[in-house]
Image (cartoon, rainbow, N blue to C red):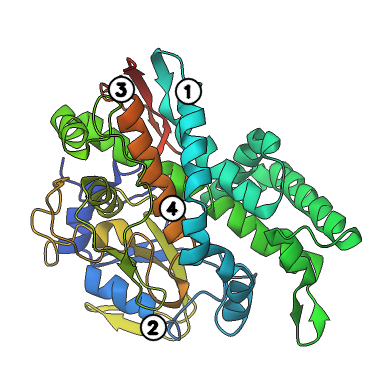
Amino acid sequence: MAVTVYNPFRPPVFDRPSLAYGHLLTERPVHYFGDFDPPFYTLSRYADVQGALRDIDTYSSEFGQGPRFTPPAGMLSNPPQHAFFRSLVQQAFSPRAIGAMHSRVEALAEELLEECAVGEWDLHDAFAFPLPVVIIAEMLGVPSSDLHLFKRWSDASVAAMGAADPSAYASELAELANYILAQIRERRAAPGRGDLIDGLVQAEQDGRRLADDEILSVVNQLLVGGNETTTSLITNVVWRLLERPDLWRRLVAESGLTRQGLRSTSGRLPSAKVDSYDNLVPRSEDLVHRALEESLRFDPPVLGLYRSTTRAVELHGVRIPENAKVMLHYAAANRDPSVWEAPNTFSLDRPAQRHLAFGLGVHFCLGAQLARLEASTALRALVRHCPDLRLVDAGERIAPFFLWGRRHLPVSLGRV
């Protein structure tokens, strides 16, 4: 279906964003969308998005990474503020720390799948959502028994970012803020728990402790970022593999992970090189990791994030003024035919190349290693438990226009 008018908020583009990538990449590499307040520009070509992500002086995060202008808050800011707040939590997401989580993530994946009944079930609700939410809740030190609240609040947070009327979500956001503030006050009264919130409460900047609203901002970013994107990564990769059953059968056959075959518990991340905060590049040729990297390229959970221009920019004959919002369209850049051969094909044999699903540069996704660990462990567990997993239908899309995943993903299975 050819798309000649790009509107990310309405069908058919809202339902299938990839329908617009060819139009953006070929005809409108700098697209102006005026039917939003504020209007925004979209960059879609790989080189342009990559360049903007690296040029933080021109394309600034100081006023938020959503489509509206917001004041600097926690890691949603420019250095040095961004660097300071990121340093407070970076250790918890280091390769060593993530590696130490492997056993817990694997045990949780097994536990969740054991609770799934034989027959038809929703992979999102029963598996892809609770896995990352429980893990980030444990890291923050908040009860995983409240995960139903975290999901509602997380959904409201991302929906408010892209909604025409964000005030519609004010009550849920107030509930989330009050909940986190109560956790912060508990740590102030009784420090020493050793969780992420406790660490933020004990942190100092220029000889002063952080204020409640500063901690609130960071915790909110971790809670939302720690579950939304990984949930979508899991549902997206399973969706694409089951959409073409030959791919799922190949994964099962080549992985050797079913209980009838050689059982493996190697859910650990492969050795990887790290280029500053840029993409981790797995060296493993393992098919599970290839499937995940292709899913991140083909269906990035975050279609794109925003920057604000600090000066006027001339690009492809279009003048982007100072103080304009610009969407950096990761998903379209990941389908740029100048970078990838047959970019609109989901392939398990694609040579490793650097996609932009986790961003690039100083704002490279803090949780990329954790997301890869959780998703690879989830996929291995599904192969072990459910080698004959089948797609019932494609479910439904999640609501925020700049995110991409399945809100429901009905599947059916039989056990081995």
Q: Say few, some or many: other residues with alpha carbon within 10 Å of mark 1 (under 14 / 14 to 19 / 20 or more).
A: few
Whether residue 100 is visible:
yes
- Residue at label 2? 55
Q: Secondary structure at mark 3?
A: loop
Whether residue 401 is visible:
no
Q: Amino acid at mark 4?
A: Ala
- Residue at x 71%, y 51% (from the top left corner): 141
Which quarter of the figure is the N terminus placed in? top left
Question: Which is in the foreground here, disc 4 or disc 3?
Answer: 4
Q: Say few, some or many: other residues with alpha carbon within 10 Å of mark 4 (under 14 / 14 to 19 / 20 or more).
A: many
Q: Say few, some or many: other residues with alpha carbon within 10 Å of mark 3 (under 14 / 14 to 19 / 20 or more).
A: some
Report whether 381 appears left or right of 218: left
- Residue at x 25%, y 62% (from the top left corner): 333
Question: Which is in the foreground here, disc 2 or disc 4?
Answer: 4
Q: Considering only order in the chain, which callout, 3 or 1, is on the residue closer to the N terminus?
A: 1
Between the C-alphas of marks 1 and 2, the distance is: 47 Å
Rendering coords of residue 180 (x, y %):
76, 52
Q: Amino acid at mark 2?
A: Asp
Placement of 257 over or under 211, stated as above or below: above
Q: Which mark is residue 114?
A: 1
- Residue at x 71%, y 41% (from the top left corner): 143
- Work out whether residue 181 or residue 194 is closer to the camera in this orientation and state it: 194
- Residue at x 30%, y 19% (from the top left corner): 392
